[in-house]
Image (cartoon, rainbow, N blue to C red):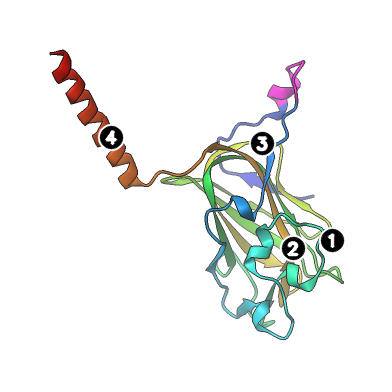
């Protein structure tokens, strides 16, 4: 059975929704690469591991993990990471992938198209997910037993709850089914945007100063 631990006070929606009637369901937006303000980046490369695009094995780019396409089973659409077969992944020796969102989101689910293209045995087994907000970490959680042995399926990382205030996500792959490789086809992220953009601190200070000046002028005119 998959173990799932969330160290957060995020609202659980199941009980509340079940107690209400005559509700019109709202489909959460599935975010794609077009919604992100920047390209995904490797935040950490585990010792002894390398992106499969740089080896004879081939493999897709980081961008292919967030393009919203889950039914492309070609090698070019699958992100492959290759290890040396000696150094295993761990919470301290992980492959980290980060993506910035174009605003502030309430996330409702994250799923992973987690499989090898032609053989069961190269799935991600466990990962840590870190959700960041504008100025601080919102929450982090670990999930394991992601490797179910099924080809070309989509596995849940988290569902059935809402985590609010998220502006960026870091996926840390901490364990793989195969000692020397893992493959990911897509991260499917669902949520609702609450803000069009994330204001920079300088922008906030400018708006604050403008407001103070405006109030002073208004007070002078009415004095």
Q: Which residue lies furthest to the front in this view?
A: 221
Vertically, is 59 above or below 221?
below
Asked whether disc 1 touches disc 2, contact meaning CB atoms under 8 Å apart, the reply is yes
Which residue: 61% across, 56% down? 128
**Label 4: how many residues lie within 10 Å, few (<14), some (14-19) or many (20+)?**
few
Q: Name the residue under label 4.
A: 208
Query: From which residue to which does the magenta span run?
Result: 15-24
Q: Position of residue 41 (x, y in %)?
A: 54, 65
Find residue 152 and name its label.
1
Residue 167 in view: no
Q: Position of residue 81 (x, y in %)?
A: 67, 74
Label 1's element? Answer: loop
Q: Where is residue 120 in the image (x, y as percent from the top left)?
A: 85, 68
In the displayed structure image, the side of residue 33 where residue 196 appears, left or right: left
Q: Is the magenta stretch mostly helix, strand or loop?
A: loop
Q: Name the residue under label 3.
A: 161
């Amino acid at each position: 059975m998959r173990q799932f631990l969330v160290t957060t006070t995020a609202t659980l929606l199941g009980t509340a929704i079940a107690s209400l009637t005559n509700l019109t369901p709202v489909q959460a937006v599935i975010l794609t690469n077009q919604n992100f303000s920047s390209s995904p980046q490797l935040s950490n490369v585990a010792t002894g591991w390398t992106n499969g695009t740089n080896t004879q094995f081939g493999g897709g780019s980081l961008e292919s993990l967030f393009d919203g396409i889950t039914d492309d089973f070609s090698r070019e659409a699958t992100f492959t990471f290759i290890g040396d077969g000696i150094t295993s992944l761990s919470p301290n020796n992980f492959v980290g992938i980060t993506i910035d969102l174009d605003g502030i989101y309430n996330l409702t689910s994250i799923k992973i198209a987690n499989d090898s293209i032609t053989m069961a045995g190269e799935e991600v087994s466990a990962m840590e997910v870190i959700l960041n907000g504008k100025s601080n970490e919102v929450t982090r959680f670990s999930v394991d037993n992601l490797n179910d042995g099924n080809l070309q399926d989509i596995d849940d990382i988290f569902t059935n709850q809402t985590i609010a205030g998220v502006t960026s996500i870091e996926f840390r792959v901490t364990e793989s089914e195969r000692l020397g490789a893992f493959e990911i086809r897509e991260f499917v992220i669902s949520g609702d945007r609450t803000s069009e953009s994330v204001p920079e601190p300088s922008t906030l200070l400018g708006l604050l100063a403008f407001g103070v000046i405006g109030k002073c002028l208004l007070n002078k005119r009415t004095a």
